[in-house]
Image: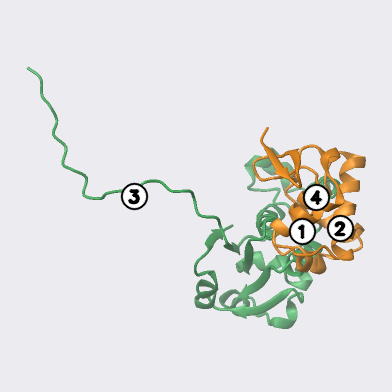
Chain colours: A orange, B green
Amino acid sequence: MPTLTMLDTALDVDAEGFLQNPEQWNESLAAEIARENGIPELTERHWMVVRYMRDRYLTTGAAPSIRSLGKESGVDIKELYKLFPKGPAKLAAKIGGIPKPKGCI
Amino acid sequence: MSATAVYPEPSVQFEPATAPRRIEKVSIIVSKGSLEGIYPALIMANGARMEGIEANLFFTFFGMDAVVKAKQGKVKVATVGNPALGLPTLLGMIPGMPAFVTRQMQKKMESLDIPPIGEFVQMIADSGGRLYACKASVDMFDLDKSDFVDAVEEIITVGDFYEMAAGGEIIFT
C-alpha cells in the first residue's frame, strides 16, 4: 500500500490519495487535503458534509450515495456541487479521511 | 526452399502511447422510453457529475418520456420482446405484467438508493447536468416546452446538440 507523508505523518493511501485507515485522520489533515484538492478553506457547510460522510462510513462501513448525502447531510444537491465542484461524494470522502466511495449512485 | 514474405513499410507511423486523456465532458442521447432504456443514461449522467465531468442529456423519440410530465411516472419495463428478462412472451403480454415487473424492479432500485425517474432527473439538473429535448421529436409528438419538467432547459436541434457536444464524448443509449 502506498504511503503519503502529510503534516509530518505517514499515511496509508490508495493510488488516488484516499486514506485507507480512518484512524490516521485529524482535522488539520482534512484542511490540508482540501487545499491540495482545490478547496482553499473548509467552511462550516463543508464540514457538515465531511462529518456526515465520515460518520456514515464509520457507523455503517460504507460511504453514503450522493442521493442520501443530499437528503441527510443538511446540504442539498445544488449546494453540494457548489461546495465541492469536482464531485461532492468523492471529495468529501477524501477530505474526511475515508476510502473512496464504491457505489455508482 | 523457403519463401520470405516481404511486407511494405507501414505508411502510417503511430505516435508512442501516452497517458490517456481524462474525460472532461459527456453528451448522452436518450432515445428509448422503457425503464431499462432510460436508467442507464441517467446513471451515467449522474455518475459523470459525481466525478466532476460535465454532462449533457439529449432526450429524443420515446426517450423523452423520462422528462415529459404526463409520462415520467408511467415508464415501464418492456416485458415483451425483451429476451434477457427470461419471461416467455406469452406471459409478458398478460395485462398487468409490465406494471408488476416494473414494481419489482423499482423496489430493488429503491433498496440500492437509485431514485425514481422524476427525482433522478431533477437530481442531475441540480448537480449541474444540463437537459435538452430534441426539436424533431417534439414536433413529431406535438409537444411544447410546457409539456416538459422544469429540469429541461430548452428544446434544441441536432445541430445545437453537436455544437454543445463539441470537444467531449457522445454516448447514444
Q: Which one is in front, B164 or A7?
A: A7
Task: Decide if residue B133 is on the left or right side of residue B17.
Answer: right
Q: Which residue is mark 3?
A: B15
Q: Secondary structure at mark 1?
A: helix
Give the x, y percent position of residue B127. Answer: 74, 66
Q: CA distance from mark 4 to mark 2?
A: 16 Å
Q: Earlier in the sequence, mark 4 or mark 2?
A: 4
Q: Which residue is mark 1?
A: A88
Query: Label 1: how many residues lie within 10 Å, few (<14), some (14-19) or many (20+)?
Result: many
Name the mark on residue A29. 4
Give the x, y percent position of residue A96. Answer: 82, 50
Q: Quadrant of the C terminus of chain B?
A: bottom right
Q: Secondary structure at mark 4?
A: helix
Q: Is there CB contact under 8 Å for labels 3 and 4?
A: no
Q: Is residue A60 above or below residue A39?
A: above
Residue at the image position 67 percent from the left and 68 percent from the top:
B64
Q: Is there CB contact under 8 Å for labels 1 and 2?
A: yes
Marks 1 and 3 belong to one chain:
no
Q: Secondary structure at mark 3?
A: loop
Task: Give residue B65's quadrant in the image.
Answer: bottom right
Query: Label 2: how many residues lie within 10 Å, few (<14), some (14-19) or many (20+)?
Result: many
Chain to which the residue tagged by mark 4 belongs: A
